[in-house]
């Protein structure tokens, strides 16, 4: 990559701005296009595990700011229908070494890059046409432009992947669960979880929205309609026990709703021509606990390889390195763990929470899968 390279990144959440930081540091001209009208605040807590992730945050100069805003994983008490405590999920089991709200991390990364990169909010790519010298891009709102490279950092439902590789159904495997995050009136200040077969709700805790996980075959709905997503949730949780009536009343009045499937991306190659995928667009495993650290790792590696070679060679090297980092992403299904479909499964999961040595072993395995102990390559710009 030369210092005159122009790069278009689709997606302004985590992977996109992280990549933009490293590319701009190496001299590239970077534009980030984001469909949403602004950064999305709040969201679920995301975490970093292991020294590799800490070193990445340190190299980017944001480790202390992330620490300042960390939420600190709260213990979640799972209760019976009558509200009696059944088990406690320790905060450190889900919170990693360092936990922060996704929206806060996105804001930190935006602040880090806003002076060196161009951000275009409220727009989306409509076509990609590769030529001998670049990629001709058209947009819903803006005028057509040509870039040397295009990066899909736009999540599991990647628009860039659809345009450059093919329809979503060819690459995303639905794992028969959905999850939702809803900002709604507080039910309790303590973090409490409640299960019934095939559905779970978690309320309270540190600044996080109410969290729903439920079993379901694949649904067809408008992912940009809060009312439609809310209707699905209300149907899925009709008749909920414990404090269900309170929860459903608060849910009915909520305006900020995010619902999505739990799924996994399966793709043979992360790039095609001058287009490359990064983050959840290329190797998502929803709620797997490794996506954020992996996104930062991928951003560093992709920019580093582009700093050393032409894009074809760099994409090949990125592919080889990231496959080893991302292989753990294909394991497990958080939906089955959080919302078992049978009462026996709920009982067994709660029993696990009472066996600390087993939890510690699972946490260590999770850290290994998160690539938190892999050695980072060294690049000249870092």
Image (cartoon, grey):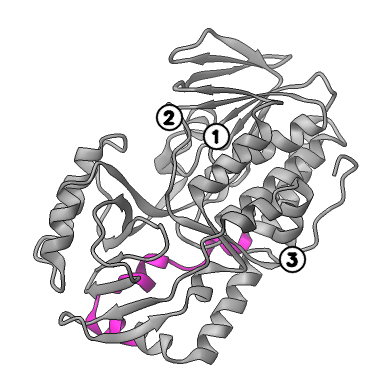
Which label was assigned to residue 12? 1
First along the sequence among labels 2 and 1: 1
Judged left or right of residue 10, residue 126 is: left
Indicate whether 181 appears above or below 32.
below
User: Rounded to the nearest whole Å, what is the CA distance between mark 2 and mark 3?
Assistant: 33 Å
Residue at the spot of label 3: 51
**Mark 2, secondary structure of its residue:** loop
Quadrant in the picture for residue 312: top right
Q: Position of residue 91 (x, y in %)?
A: 48, 74
User: Rounded to the nearest whole Å, what is the CA distance between mark 3 and mark 1?
Assistant: 25 Å
Q: Quadrant of the N terminus?
A: top right
Q: Quadrant of the C terminus?
A: top right
Q: Main secondary structure of the magenta part?
A: helix
Indicate whether 18 appears above or below 176.
above
User: Rounded to the nearest whole Å, what is the CA distance between mark 2 and mark 1?
Assistant: 9 Å
Q: Residue at x 35, y 70 (%)?
A: 191
Residue at the spot of label 2: 36
Q: Residue at x 50, y 50 (%)?
A: 102
First along the sequence among labels 2 and 3: 2
């Amino acid at each position: 990559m030369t210092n005159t390279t122009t790069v278009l990144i689709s997606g302004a959440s985590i992977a996109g701005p992280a990549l933009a930081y490293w590319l701009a540091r190496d001299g590239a001209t970077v534009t980030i296009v984001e469909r949403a009208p602004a950064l999305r605040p709040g969201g679920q807590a995301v975490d970093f595990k292991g020294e590799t992730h800490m070193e990445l945050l340190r190299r980017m100069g944001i480790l202390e700011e992330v620490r300042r805003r960390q939420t600190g994983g709260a213990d979640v008490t799972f209760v019976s229908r009558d509200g009696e405590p059944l088990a406690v999920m320790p905060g450190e089991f889900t919170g990693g070494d360092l936990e922060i709200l996704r929206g806060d991390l996105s804001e930190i990364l935006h602040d880090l890059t806003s002076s060196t990169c161009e951000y275009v909010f409220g727009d989306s790519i409509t076509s990609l046409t590769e030529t001998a010298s670049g990629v001709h891009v058209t947009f819903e709102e803006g005028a057509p432009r040509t870039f040397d490279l295009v990066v899909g950092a736009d999540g599991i439902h990647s628009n860039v992947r659809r345009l450059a590789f093919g329809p979503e159904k060819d690459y995303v495997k639905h794992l028969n669960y959905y999850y939702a995050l809803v900002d709604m009136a507080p039910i309790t200040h303590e973090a409490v979880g409640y299960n019934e077969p095939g559905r779970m709700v978690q309320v309270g805790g540190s600044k996080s929205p109410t969290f729903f996980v439920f079993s379901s075959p694949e649904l067809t709905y408008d992912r940009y309609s809060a009312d439609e997503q809310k209707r699905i949730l209300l149907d899925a949780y009709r008749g909920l026990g414990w404090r269900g009536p309170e929860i459903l009343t608060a849910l009915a009045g909520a305006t900020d709703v995010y619902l999505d499937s739990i799924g996994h991306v399966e793709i043979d190659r992360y790039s095609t021509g001058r287009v490359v995928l990064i983050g959840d667009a290329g190797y998502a495993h929803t709620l797997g606990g490794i996506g954020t650290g992996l996104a930062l790792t991928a951003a560093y590696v992709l920019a580093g390889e582009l700093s050393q070679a032409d894009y074809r060679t760099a994409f090949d090297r990125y592919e080889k390195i990231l496959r080893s980092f991302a292989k753990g992403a294909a394991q497990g299904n958080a939906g089955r763990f959080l919302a078992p479909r049978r009462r026996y499964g709920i009982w067994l999961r709660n029993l696990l929470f009472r066996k600390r040595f087993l939890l510690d072993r699972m946490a260590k395995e999770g850290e290994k899968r998160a690539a938190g102990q892999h050695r980072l390559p060294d690049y000249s710009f870092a």
